[in-house]
Image (spheres, rainbow, N blue to C red):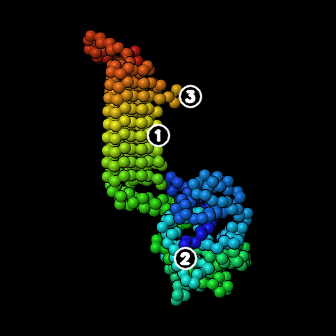
Amino acid sequence: MRDNILTIILAAGKGTRMKSLVPKVLHKLGGYPILGHVLSTVEKIKSNHNLLLLSPDMPDIEHYARQHPLSLDIVYQDEQKGTGHAVLCAKSYLQDFKGIVLVLFGDTPLIRPETLKTMLEKFSSFSPRISAMVVGMIPSNPKNYGRLILDEAENVIDIIETKGASAKVLDIPLCNSGVMLLDGCHALSMLQAIRENTESGEYYLTDIVRIARCQGHRVGFYRAEDPNELEGINSRSELAWAEAQLQHRWRTAAMEEGVTLIDPQSIYFSYDTQLSGDVTVYPHVFFGAGVTVESGVEIMPFTHLEGVSVKARAKIGPYARLRPGTIVGEESRIGNFVEMKNTVFGRGAKAGHLSYIGDAEVGEATNIGAGTITCNYDGYHKWPTKIGHHVLVGANSSLVAPLTIGSYAIIGAGSTVTKDVAEEALTVGRSRQMDITDGGKAFHERKKNRNTHTKKDSA
């Protein structure tokens, strides 16, 4: 039988090194807040109870957290007195709790649910049961991480912070990640035994190791296989580093699922990008949030997609922009410098060049000529354009919404269409062409016979 799990996520830090008016944990990775990644990971381990620890002056974070699907309670740390004090703010939840207490940080978005599940299984595997388990790592750059001291049985006997540490200690590669698991039977008594650090005035969670040993308990150890998962984000450069880590993870996963990425490093995914097998993505493609792409689709270079569903075997780009609400039908073709917004584009339809299609429905096998635009905004409201099946819209046409064009109709090139068009009709909405016999010849003769140029002569 699985232990009950109480997850405590610490997110009360000010994040001053970000130098931003936006709270640190609300900065985005792959279009999703740092904290959102952590909450989504916790959601997948099916923790029984979840607490988010905040400072009372963090309404934006609280608002975001309450909108997240993860069920959680907010706990406040009125004063910033260190990690030990922060966890102790959950005292009312720790009383009489007998399961596993999992302590995480809101600024470590790379940790995977599989890693957390392995940690929990490792904790439960100790016999006799341990009172705490420290998660360690060997990072490429130890930075200011505390060093873990283990005995021969790999019990943790101390955590030594870098400040004031000897050279011998600093040579130890094994570092404290900050993630810790506690036995609920002993968690509260150990936390209450933490004393204030005389230099900093803070209460450190790492003192749990010393306290547990003094109380006659063992402290177990788990080494994370990938130290990158446990790296926290405290600056813009670390944010960029974490973005690169996630992008590499997502690109690798896509290719393992049968997606061809011609130049993976130049392709940007969002947290929820969904690509089916046999999709081919060319260099410099940007996937914003909410994009799904079905099998056999080709996405050509410098294409931007957001909030879009692309059906099987369609071809997009190059230099196309597909905006939220757009559904691209099977085997359709959207070419260079075409922008679509909130449009259902039918099976086999084509818009090859230089067009804007917004708030529209376009039927199967319809062809949108180069330079066509749907004039959907009158300065106050957005209006729809409905185009039937097998319609031919000539180049450089302006379709003034609200407008309906029936199936099999033809719109002459250069037309401005303001009235509905019936099925199978031919509509031409442009000025009549006027020809002047020998007019060109007369113009050139006038120009050659004059030494000066005036605006009147050019007319």
Q: Left or right of 266: which side holds 378?
A: right
Residue type at mark 1 is Gly
Query: Is residue 413 among the parts visible in the rendering?
Result: no
Q: Distance between the residues labelled 1 and 2?
A: 47 Å
Q: Which residue is drawn at 33% across and 14% down?
A: 433
Q: Position of residue 78 (x, y in %)?
A: 73, 63
Q: Which residue is drawn at 62% across and 80% down?
A: 131
Q: Which residue is drawn at 39% across and 32% down?
A: 362
Q: Name the residue under label 1.
A: 325
Circle 2 SS class: helix
Q: Left or right of 189: which side holds 106?
A: left
Q: Nearer the viewer, mark 2 or mark 3?
A: 2
Residue 124 disc label: 2
Taking depth in this image into account, of 184 and 159 the one nearest to the observer is 184
Q: Position of residue 311 (x, y in %)?
A: 37, 44
Q: How far apart are marks 2 and 3 (CA)?
A: 62 Å
Residue type at mark 2 is Ser
Residue that extends furthest to the bottom in the rendered view of this protein: 152
Query: Is residue 254 among the parts visible in the rendering?
Result: yes
Q: Which residue is drawn at 66% across and 76% down?
A: 185
Q: Which of marks 1 and 2 is in front?
A: 2
Q: Where is residue 44 in the image (x, y as percent from the top left)?
A: 52, 62
Q: Nearer the viewer, mark 3 or mark 1?
A: 1
Within-10-Å neighbours for mark 2: few <14, some 14–19, many 20+: some
Residue that extends furthest to the top in the rendered view of this protein: 437
Q: Name the residue under label 3.
A: 380
